[in-house]
Amino acid sequence: MIKSELVLKIAEQNPHLYQRDVENIVNAILDTIADALARGDRVELRGFGAFSVKRREARRGRNPRTGAAVAVAEKAIPVFKTGKEMRLRLNAAGIGSDEPSRAEAAAS
């Protein structure tokens, strides 16, 4: 799902709101999360998950084409960890699994 699809879905579920207002709300939420991460804060949405920033130290890398050593600068990486409720919903729905679960395999 992309942001425009999210806006459409929320607008459909809330017919009393204009689509442009829903888009402004979604943008405000995402901008607030991004600003908090830029400050180094952690953003936790109960039941959904937590966003945080992980620092990667500067290191010596290698150019895969030439094999030459290159310096890789320190960087900040956004990290998302799912909440317990989200994990339970995904596992109950069987998302991401191409093979039957152990319970289904045992039943057949």
Image (cartoon, rainbow, N blue to C red):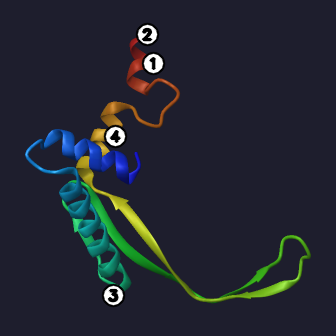
8 left or right of 65 in image: left
Residue farthest to the left, as pictured? 16
Going by the numbered disc 4, the residue's amino acid type is: Leu
Going by the numbered disc 2, the residue's amino acid type is: Ser
**Residue at 23%, 48% in the rendered image:** 85
Q: Closer to us: mark 1 or mark 4?
A: 4
Marker disc for residue 90: 4
First along the sequence among labels 1 and 4: 4
| Residue 107, x across and y down, in percent | 38, 13
- Could you say whether the residue bearing mark 4 is in a helix, strand or loop? helix
Classify 10 Å Cα crowding around label 4: few (below 14), some (14-19), many (20 and above): few
- Could you say whether the residue bearing mark 2 is in a helix, strand or loop? loop
Q: Nearer the viewer, residue 28 or 38?
A: 28
Q: Is residue 67 above or below residue 103?
A: below
- Say whether marks 1 and 4 touch (CB < 8 Å): no
Classify 10 Å Cα crowding around label 3: few (below 14), some (14-19), many (20 and above): few
**Residue at 41%, 50% in the rendered image:** 2
Q: Closer to us: mark 3 or mark 4?
A: 3
Going by the numbered disc 1, the residue's amino acid type is: Ala
| Residue 40, x across and y down, in percent | 35, 85
How far is disc 1 from disc 3 in space, using C-alphas? Answer: 48 Å
- Say whether marks 2 and 1 touch (CB < 8 Å): yes
How far is disc 4 from disc 2 in space, using C-alphas? Answer: 23 Å
- Could you say whether the residue bearing mark 1 is in a helix, strand or loop? helix
Marker disc for residue 108: 2
